[in-house]
Image (cartoon, grey):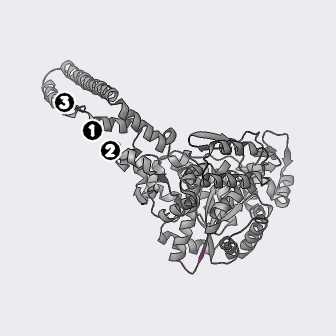
């Protein structure tokens, strides 16, 4: 029988202080977001976005998406959602993700399910409005190293080819070699066969990585009405022209984000530092930074140089040649979508929080920011191992060394904890310090030195005793270490390392409905699901 538990994000030890403070609505974070992700916040966001998003933009958005979906088999719900985007009472909930091979890390699923579930929840709260789930493909990203592989049961399945320009335009030629690896490594059951067919249909029968990713995401989520957006579109970029010009001429993003970073850095690490110009020049096989020097625009790592007036004319006539970087992409998204909320991971939320001032400056509503659902899928065999080892759910998130230390102390037939001895020692030195106050400073110094020496001696003895007991219980120590590595590969969250294929082989078509049934995007807690 399926079981579902939650724990606080901060209790996992895997989430930043900024994210934990945000979820706690700590006043230190208030300046960096707009409305909080709760029903009251969404009511305010609907009013704000509804009053600013134009009918003309909706028509362009709809037209461009219909064109992007040509040749794609649409579910009835996705088709309906595309049509709803023309209506002034329709809003989107959006997540974005790179074009990772075969979805990459498992959390790809959690992002999209968070989006889908939030649209359902908002429809029940605000029935007079429509809410469309959107997946924004990062087609213009050029970091091929990050997307060219996925992990399957600890093995990296990799696409070997030379990178070049925006990844969305990469040909799928050569992915038959990856398919051979999948055939070799995946299982033999019906679920494994479905996965192999899915990879073949997506990556061997589509021409580009954009087409392959759209096909794959549509196959997985079309039944939920997911709308997939490719921002690398001349029609959509035409809507962004005024903001491209402003960035080129006024360095708006650099100025506002730099100011935000000054205050944010007083309490939290900075995720991304702005460039003077936060745009790339995009061409076939090329995505390079735009630099300005002596009133001319230079394309980094090339010989391309443009006079200002020529470059600005290009913006108006060929906006598709301009690509937003990580700090400008959120603005582009919010300009072209009637969006209420962006759902992402902790790192994404951190750089979005650097951008509120930038949005205010250009008078575009800043969306609600929502930390995506995070999940540990706890298979029954691992749960049995935890029971045998006496590990409680909250303990499995502990650092491996701390968990082993705790368990060895619990099962040891001798007392390893020297807390009582340290307490006695502390009391003795309190009395000696009182005596030293009545003598000269040299005696007082000797007392302090001796206290430090004795306490250090106890610490060393405790560590040596613990080490000896670890050797005595080596089998249990190894089993705990093995369990931690299986559930937290490379000391990381499962969702950041494993691929969905491992779990699809186990649960098949029940996997996504199972997650959709369990995950509450507004619950703001970490989920542990025992399927």
- Between discs 3 and 1, the one toward the N terminus: 1
Q: CA distance from mark 1 to mark 2?
A: 10 Å
Vertical arrangement, residue 353 with respect to residue 415, above or below: below
Q: CA distance from mark 2 to mark 3?
A: 28 Å
Q: Tell me residue 74's x, y (percent).
A: 71, 69
Q: Is residue 395 visible?
A: no
Mark 2 residue crowding within 10 angstroms, few (<14) / some (14–19) / many (20+): few
Q: Nearer the viewer, residue 308 or 164?
A: 164
The dot on residue 390 is: 2
Position of 284 with respect to 34 (left or right) is right
The dot on residue 410 is: 1
Tag 1 and tag 2, C-beta contact below 8 Å: yes
Q: CA distance from mark 3 to mark 1?
A: 19 Å
Front of the two marks 3 and 1: 1
Residue at point 85%, 56% (across, down) = 314
Check disc 1 and report its element: helix, strand or loop: helix
Q: Nearer the viewer, residue 326 or 232?
A: 232
Q: Magenta span covers which residues? A: 125-130
């Amino acid at each position: 029988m399926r079981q579902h538990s939650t724990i606080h994000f901060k209790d996992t030890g895997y989430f930043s202080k900024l994210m934990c403070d945000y979820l706690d609505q700590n006043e230190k974070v208030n300046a960096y977001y707009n409305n909080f992700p709760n029903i009251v916040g969404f009511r305010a966001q609907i009013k704000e976005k509804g009053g600013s998003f134009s009918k003309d933009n909706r028509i362009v958005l709809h037209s461009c998406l219909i064109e992007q979906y040509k040749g794609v088999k649409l579910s009835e719900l996705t088709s309906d959602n595309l049509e709803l985007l023309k209506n002034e009472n329709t809003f989107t909930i959006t997540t974005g993700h790179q074009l990772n091979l075969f979805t990459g890390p498992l959390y790809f699923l959690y992002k999209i399910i968070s989006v889908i579930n939030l649209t359902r929840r908002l429809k029940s709260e605000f029935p007079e409005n429509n809410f469309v789930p959107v997946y924004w493909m990062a087609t213009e990203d050029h970091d091929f190293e990050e997307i060219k592989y996925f992990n399957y049961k600890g093995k990296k399945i990799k696409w070997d080819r030379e990178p070049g320009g925006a990844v969305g335009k990469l040909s799928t030629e050569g992915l038959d070699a990856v398919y051979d690896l999948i055939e070799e490594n995946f299982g033999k059951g019906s679920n494994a066969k479905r996965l192999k067919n899915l990879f073949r249909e997506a990556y061997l029968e589509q021409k580009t990585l954009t087409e392959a990713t759209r096909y794959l995401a549509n196959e997985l989520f079309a039944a939920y009405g997911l709308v997939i957006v490719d921002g690398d579109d001349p029609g959509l970029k035409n809507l962004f022209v005024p903001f491209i010009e402003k960035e080129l001429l006024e360095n708006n993003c650099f100025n506002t984000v730099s100011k935000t970073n000054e205050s944010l850095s007083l309490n939290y690490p900075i995720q991304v530092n702005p460039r003077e110009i936060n745009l790339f020049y995009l061409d076939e096989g090329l995505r390079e930074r735009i630099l300005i020097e002596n009133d001319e625009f230079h394309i980094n790592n090339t010989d391309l140089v443009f006079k200002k007036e020529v470059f600005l004319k290009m913006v108006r006539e060929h906006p598709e040649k301009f690509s937003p970087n990580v700090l400008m992409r959120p603005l582009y998204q919010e300009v072209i979508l009637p969006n209420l909320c962006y759902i992402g991971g902790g790192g994404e939320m951190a750089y979005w929080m650097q951008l509120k001032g930038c949005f205010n400056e250009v008078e575009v509503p800043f969306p609600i920011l929502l930390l995506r659902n995070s999940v540990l899928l706890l298979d029954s065999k691992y749960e049995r191992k935890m029971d045998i080892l006496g590990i409680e759910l909250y303990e499995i998130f502990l650092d491996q060394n701390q968990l082993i230390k705790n368990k060895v102390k619990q099962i040891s037939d001798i007392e390893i904890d020297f807390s009582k001895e340290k307490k006695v020692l502390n009391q003795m030195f309190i009395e000696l310090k009182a005596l030293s106050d009545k003598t000269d400073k040299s005696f007082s110094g000797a007392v302090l030195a001796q206290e430090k020496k004795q306490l250090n001696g106890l610490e060393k003895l405790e560590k040596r005793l613990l080490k000896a007991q670890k050797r005595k219980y080596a089998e249990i120590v190894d089993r705990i270490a093995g369990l931690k590595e299986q559930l937290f590969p490379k000391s990381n969250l499962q969702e950041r390392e494993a691929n969905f294929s491992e779990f699809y082989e186990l649960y098949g078509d029940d996997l996504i409905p199972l997650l959709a049934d369990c995950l509450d995007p507004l619950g703001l807690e970490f989920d542990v699901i025992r399927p």
